[in-house]
Every structure is written in C-alpha cells, then in structure tokens.
Amino acid sequence: MPARAVHIDRVALADLTPELFAQIYRNKRPLLITHALDRNWLTPQTLRDDLPEIVEVMRAHDCHTFLDDSRSVRKETVGADSLMQSVWSDTGVDEELVYYRGLPTESMRDRFAAVMNGVEERCGVKTEPKRYGLWVGTRGNVTPMHYDSCHVFLAQIVGRKRWVIFSHEDTRSIYPYDGFNMPYHAAKPQYLNLLYEARYPSITRTEIESAIRVTDPWQGGFGQFCKLANCDPMLCELGPGEVIYNPSGFW
C-alpha cells in the first residue's frame, strides 16, 4: 500500500487539557500546540546577551544535514557575534550553514521555565529545567532522521521548522543504522523532508535522488529503501510561538 502523508493534529493551548493529552497523545502520537508561547519573550539581542563570547558550532560535511556525530559534522569554535550574523543573515549559501547546540544559561532557563509552565500544566507533565536545551541554526539546516529515547517538547521561538515524523511501529521499515557506521538512533534514508513535499530550495531533486536512490514516493518508487512505502509519514511546519510534542521512540 503506497505511503500517504498524515498531517499532525494542531490543538490550541487553551483547548488542551491533561485528560485530553493523556488519552490521545501521550506515548501515542505527536501533537502540535498552537498559541503556546509569547513570541516576544526572546529577541536576537536577548539571545546574544545570554550566549558566551565563544561558542562551539557544527558544520555539516555535506553542507546540509546535521547530526551530532563526527561522521556527520565537524565542530569549530566561533564568536557569538559571528554565529548570530550567520543565523540572522538570509544568504541561503550552503557553505554558511551552521548549527549551535548547547545548554541555556541559568537566566534563560529560568525565563523559559516560566514561559513553558502553561504548556506543562495543560499537558499534565513537569520537565526539570536542567533538561532544557537550546538549538540555534541557519535557514536550510536539515536534521537527519533519528529518534530520541525521551519524550520531547520542542518550542519554536524564531523561524519555522518542517517536520517529517514516523511512528515507532514503523521502525523495521525505517532502516536504522547498526551503531557501527552511524549511531543506532539514526536511520539511513536522508532528505526525507524534501522527499515528502517539504522541499528546501537549496537542494535539487537530482541531488536527493542521487543521495538516497529513490524516486517520487507517491509513485511507489523507493529504490533501496522500498519498505518506506509501507509507512505513513506525519507532516507539520512549526512556527514561532508553537510547541511540538514528539513521543519517545518516534522517528
């Protein structure tokens, strides 16, 4: 049966209750929570003020895909001002793509905890602020398909992020790595964001087909990753002020 795209449920924070979240979403399926955060609580200037003067960033070997592993990225230190300039410039030049992953400062963590408190109350969950992470990237960055062993609440503060998610029940059809060539929590098919109608202009269709040896999934052709044809991807685009919940084990 050919794959079909399933759009992730969108629920406004005001309409969410702990009972609804537990019954339909927790451990079961992703959820996009709209009108969840004040878009203005973090500005480029306040972010810059909270960053150390020197930060460690990732640059992808293929200029597109970022997985925190030496086989996927190289790491280098840059000035925080340089990072901010790369992120807020809109050049779209592949060589300039950069990704910062770090821990928020104590002051940022406290402010974010206050902002996320409403989301956690509506979902009936509680997250330790020490588990918060901060991700800052340039437009066009791609995170390869992988899963997290914990439940994830990801808040989009600035910009937009396109998601392609597969259920944990599809794991046998996802082609996960064995832990030797790449981390076991990553999967072999790449550029699925482009394959499933979320195309970035910086990568051509020819590059995609060459990289993952597939043709259009809607025509049933998945090449060496033919089991993907049995999976139903869940799609969404996360915007500023929105939060996505992704259960543990979902790709």
Image (cartoon, grey):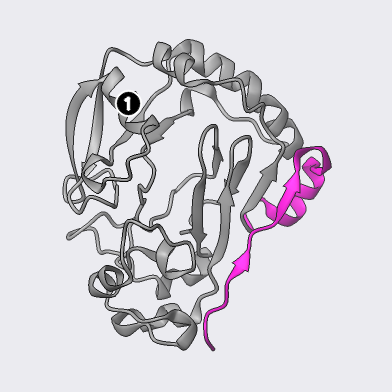
What residue is shown at x 33% (from left), y 45% (from top)?
92
Above or below: residue 91 compared with residue 104: below
Dot 1 surroundings within 10 Å: few (below 14), some, or many (20 or more)? few
Is 109 within the magenta?
no
Is 23 within the magenta?
yes
Residue 61 in the image: x percent, y percent?
17, 50
Residue 194 placement, left or right of 34: left
Residue 47 in the image: x percent, y percent?
45, 19
Farthest residue to the front: give it: 91
The magenta segment is 1-28
Residue 44 in the image: x percent, y percent?
46, 21
What residue is shown at x 60% (from left), y 21% (from top)?
113
Residue 251 in the image: x percent, y percent?
46, 59
Residue occupied by mark 1? 85
What residue is shown at x 23% (from left), y 74% (from top)?
210
Above or below: residue 125 compared with residue 145: above
Q: Nearer the viewer, residue 219 or 234?
A: 219
**Quarter occupied by residue 139:** top left
Residue 127 placement, left or right of 33: left
For the residue labelled by badge 1, is the local secondary structure a helix, a strand or a loop?
helix
Looking at the picture, which amino acid does disc 1 mark?
Answer: Gln
Q: Nearer the viewer, residue 83 or 172?
A: 83
Residue 146 placement, left or right of 210: right
Residue 111 placement, left or right of 121: left
Quadrant holding the N terminus: bottom right
